[in-house]
Amino acid sequence: GDVAVLVPAAGAGVRLGPGGPKALRQIGGEPLLVHAVRRIAAAPSVHTIVVAAPPGDAEAVRELLAPIAELIVVAGGATRQESVAAALAAVPPGPEIVLVHDAARALTPAILVEAVATAIRSGEDAAIPVLPVVDTIKEVSTDGVVLGTVDRSALRAVQTPQGFRRSVLTAAHAAAVDPLTDDAGLVEKQGVRVACVPGSEYALKITRPFDLALAEHLLNAENS
Ligand code: CTP
Ligand code: MG
């Protein structure tokens, strides 16, 4: 394996509601982070996994994940970007391809990890999984009145894992000023070309209670 995967898992999960850090919330009796790491570890290209844990839970996360894969656990930061930066700083010398993958996308199949890694290995500096936008998208004023309908044909919903040549991601994080919600956004600012690969519906980001219930159902269907 020539790939390191950074797993930001330090978020509070505010939109999921009370119940502790999102990465430690459970589906099928196991934390989202366990599901995510198990699938990452199943991807043949993956050599190193670095998890950014909720600040107070790094030791517990280390114990939780030790049976699944050999990995590095660091304390995450106040923003996703800080968590990714902390994980990136802990990658040992070796891997020249770095993927960043949200713990919240717990059901992401290993094949998507491979597809993103393959895009970088075949020469892209950055590659992200995307899906077409299915809903009609409108721009709306702050007082809730429609300003117009956006042409969605060129729009894509973006998932993780996002893949990068290691030097490209390191440079983008070093140059970062304002926190962004994804890493491709940082490398775009550096003028780097970002390629798209087909995403997966299973890579949905578990954000709200409905998503958690959906993920639970998908997991049950998979195991029956
Ligand atoms: N994340 C992180 N460090 C942070 C914030 C987010 O590592 N300070 C991680 C989350 O754990 C998650 C991923 O980034 O795996 C995507 O973030 P999001 O879905 O927004 O998760 P939360 O920030 O936990 O959720 P919310 O915004 O609802 O609080
Ligand atoms: Mg968040």
Image (spheres, rainbow, N blue to C red):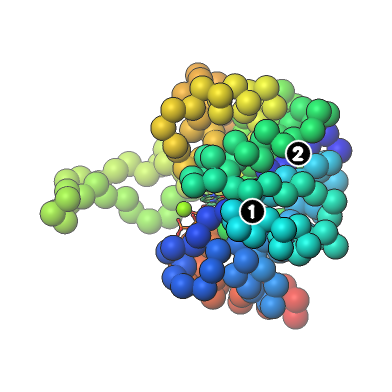
Q: Residues within 10 Å of mark 2 (few under 14, many from 20)?
A: many
Which mark is on residue 4? 2
* Residue 33 visible from this viewpoint: yes
Identify whether 94 is placed above or below 110: above
Dot 2 amino acid type: Ala
Residue 16 spot, x, y in % from top left: 46, 67
- Horizontally, residue 116 falls left or right of residue 15, namely right
Residue 137 spot, x, y in % from top left: 32, 50
Instruction: Give the residue at mark 1.
Output: 53
Disc 2 to disc 1, how far (Cα)?
Answer: 16 Å
For image coordinates 76% across by 57% down, the residue present is 62
Quadrant for the C terminus in the image: bottom right
Q: Are marks 2 and 1 in contact (CB under 8 Å)?
A: no
* Residue furthest top in the image: 191
Q: Secondary structure at mark 2?
A: strand
Residue 1 spot, x, y in % from top left: 86, 38
* Camera-side residue of 206 and 13: 13
